[in-house]
Image: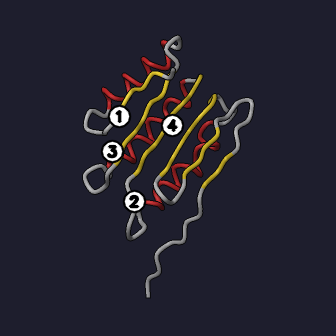
Amino acid sequence: MNQSPVLENLHIAASDYTPEIRFDVDGTFSICGKSYPENTFEFYAPVLSWLETWFTLPKQPPIVLDFELIYFNSSSSKLLYDLLDILDAHREQQDIRVNWHYHPENESAREAGEDFAEDFEYLNIHLQALA
C-alpha cells in the first residue's frame, strides 16, 4: 500500500547572510531578510526539496508565498527563480499567489520583483510596496 509522504512545517531561522524561511503545510510560505549565503545551492536545496514533496501530497491548500527580501545576490536570484519555476509548473492545478514586498526606496528589490513577474507572466505575482 502506497502511503503519502508526511511533511512537517519547514522553518529555517535567519542569519546575517540568510533569510528566515517559513513553509507551512497550510500553504503559508515566506522568505524574509537578506540572502547571500556562502553556498546558495546548499542553503536552498532543502527548501526546493520540501516544495517538491509538498506537491506530492494528496490535497494541498492554496499557496500564499510572501517574499520580503532586503537584499539578495545573483546566486540567490537563480535559486529564487528555480523556486518560482516549481510553482509555475503547478499553477494550473493549484491556487498560488506570490506577494513580492519591497521597501519603496529599495529600487533594486522592486525591479527584481518586476523581472520575476515578467519571467513568470502566468504566475499570480503581486508587487506590494511596504508602508
Q: Is residue 39 above or below residue 93?
A: above
User: What percent of the width, then of the height, locates residue 77?
Assistant: 50, 29
Reading the image, the residue beneath label 2 is 61
Q: Give the secondary structure at mark 3.
A: helix
Residue occupying the point 74% across, 30% down = 16
Q: Give the secondary structure at mark 2.
A: loop
Q: Is residue 3 above or below residue 20?
A: below
Task: Measure the C-alpha gap from mark 2 to mark 4.
Answer: 24 Å
Reading the image, the residue beneath label 3 is 88
Q: Give the secondary structure at mark 4.
A: helix
Task: Measure the C-alpha gap from mark 3 to mark 2.
Answer: 16 Å
Reading the image, the residue beneath label 4 is 79
Going by the picture, which residue comes out furthest to the front?
A: 131
Q: Sequence order check: which comes first, mark 3 or mark 2?
A: 2
Q: Sequence order check: which comes first, mark 4 or mark 3?
A: 4
Q: Amino acid at mark 4?
A: Leu
Residue occupying the point 39% across, 59% down = 61
User: Is disc 1 surrounded by few (<14), some (14 to 19) or many (20+) residues within 10 Å?
Assistant: many
Q: Amino acid at mark 2?
A: Pro
Q: Give the secondary structure at mark 1.
A: strand
Q: Sequence order check: which comes first, mark 1 or mark 3?
A: 3
Q: Quadrant of the N terminus?
A: bottom left
Reading the image, the residue beneath label 1 is 125
User: What percent of the width, then of the height, locates residue 64?
Assistant: 43, 46
Which numbered mark, 1 or 4, is in the foreground of this view? 1
User: What percent of the width, then of the height, locates residue 44?
Assistant: 58, 43
Going by the picture, which residue comes out furthest to the right?
A: 16
Task: Measure the C-alpha gap from mark 1 to mark 2.
Answer: 18 Å
Q: Amino acid at mark 3?
A: Asp
User: Is disc 2 surrounded by few (<14), some (14 to 19) or many (20+) residues within 10 Å?
Assistant: few
